[in-house]
Amino acid sequence: MYDGLTIYGSTEFLSNVAGKESLFLCTIATTETSRIEGITGAGVTPELTEYTPAADVELIVRGAPSCLPEIPQTVVGGVSAPTPAVITKAALELANIPFLVADAGAAIKPNLPYIKINDQAGKDIRTGKAVDSAENIFENAKILGKTLSQITDHLIIGESTPAGTTTALGVLTALGYDASFKVSGSMPENPHHLKKDVVKEGMENAGIPWGETVKDAFQAVEAVGDPMIPAVAGLVMGSEIPISLAGGTQMTAVCALIKAINPDFDFSRLCITTTIFVAQDATSDINHIVEQIGDISIYAVDPYFHKSDNEGLQTYLNGSVKEGVGAGGAILAAMTQGISLDDIRQKIEKLCQEIF
């Protein structure tokens, strides 16, 4: 159907959104979990990870971050891998898709207009008290989801949440899913043992026995999740239009929460859109997680960075960076508007030359 696209599931969703008016909403959040040494590559130091979401969206809107003196990049073998935000920026600009930011709970606020769903950042999940008032976050997001569904035909929801795969593992595990050693990561070496140990400690401190399913969906988030998960779940359940969840295994936790809230939810009106770097990651298994939740189609785009001469983009090929800020979903959205993959890649390369 589209060059560079691998489909896991049905093509029906793609047919429904092709050529339709789209809106991209990036949901940002942070948790103190990202300060744990070695758990995420979404920042030069653990302390700076809390700046990454604000810097990402500032880059997309303003062309450069103002909350940090330097643009977030992952350095591998002396080569800097540009943030996935540059991919999202290139695709959305080519397709002329509007971009909005929603704060689900980011410690550092971006220097641009944004919609507030929740003001408070998440805590370290090892405490077993990761998120305050998850249900309130969810209800606020439902209101926004209903509003946005009245002004567009297709809502694309991306996210920027450092250590989000760890908090996703927490929620999936608390809700009874087999997700250990299955969630993705932002580094070539996926620290699965560290993630599992962190989740175990959080569940123990929350009084949740390992292997036991939490009956209260929001309790799972409040114990070992992050603010983004209930926010995106609320956006989905409040809307009435097709939704692309633009992200990696973090979005499987969103789907798990939705199912826990409403076991009869119709997943046919949403899909997960990601990159091939997540879908074919040997250190994780997004398909295994999704199959446990429901009939959810996954669309994975390959931006063909092997054709690029840009060394930074080539680092994506070894797993240094896989996904973020809705990069895969933004590329696919542009493709459904008739933009070729080659044009998108060339735009990405041009922005890399201009920005980095």
Image: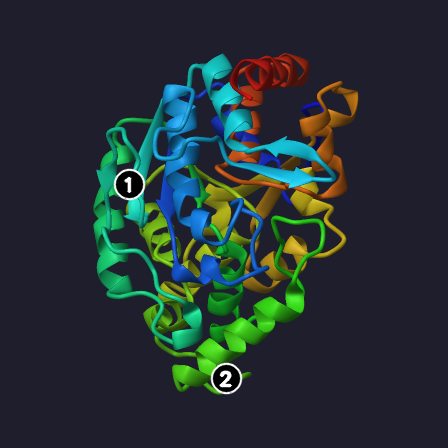
- Quadrant occupied by the N terminus: top right
Position of residue 253 measured from the top left corner of the image (x, y, whole percent):
48, 59
Question: Which residue is at a point 72% across and 49% down the rendered structure image?
Answer: 281
**Residue 158 shown left or right of residue 297 in the figure:** left
Q: Which mark is residue 199?
A: none
Reply above or below: 265 against 25. Answer: below
**Residue 189 shown left or right of residue 61 in the figure:** right
Which residue type does callout 1 highlight? Lys
Reply above or below: 289 against 141. Answer: below
Q: Earlier in the sequence, mark 1 or mark 2?
A: 1
**Residue 262 seen in render:** yes
Report the mark closest to the observer, 1 or 2: 1
Q: Tell me whether circle 1 and circle 2 mark residues in contact (CB < 8 Å).
A: no
Question: Which residue is at a point 58% across and 67% down the rendered structure image?
Answer: 195
Position of residue 311 measured from the top left corner of the image (x, y, whole percent):
73, 25
Q: Nearer the viewer, residue 268 or 300?
A: 300
Q: Secondary structure at mark 1?
A: loop
Reply above or below: 34 against 81. Answer: below
**Residue 13 shown left or right of residue 148 in the figure:** right
Q: Residues within 10 Å of mark 2 (few under 14, many from 20)?
A: few
- Residue pointed to by mark 1: 109
Q: Secondary structure at mark 2?
A: loop
- Residue pointed to by mark 2: 212
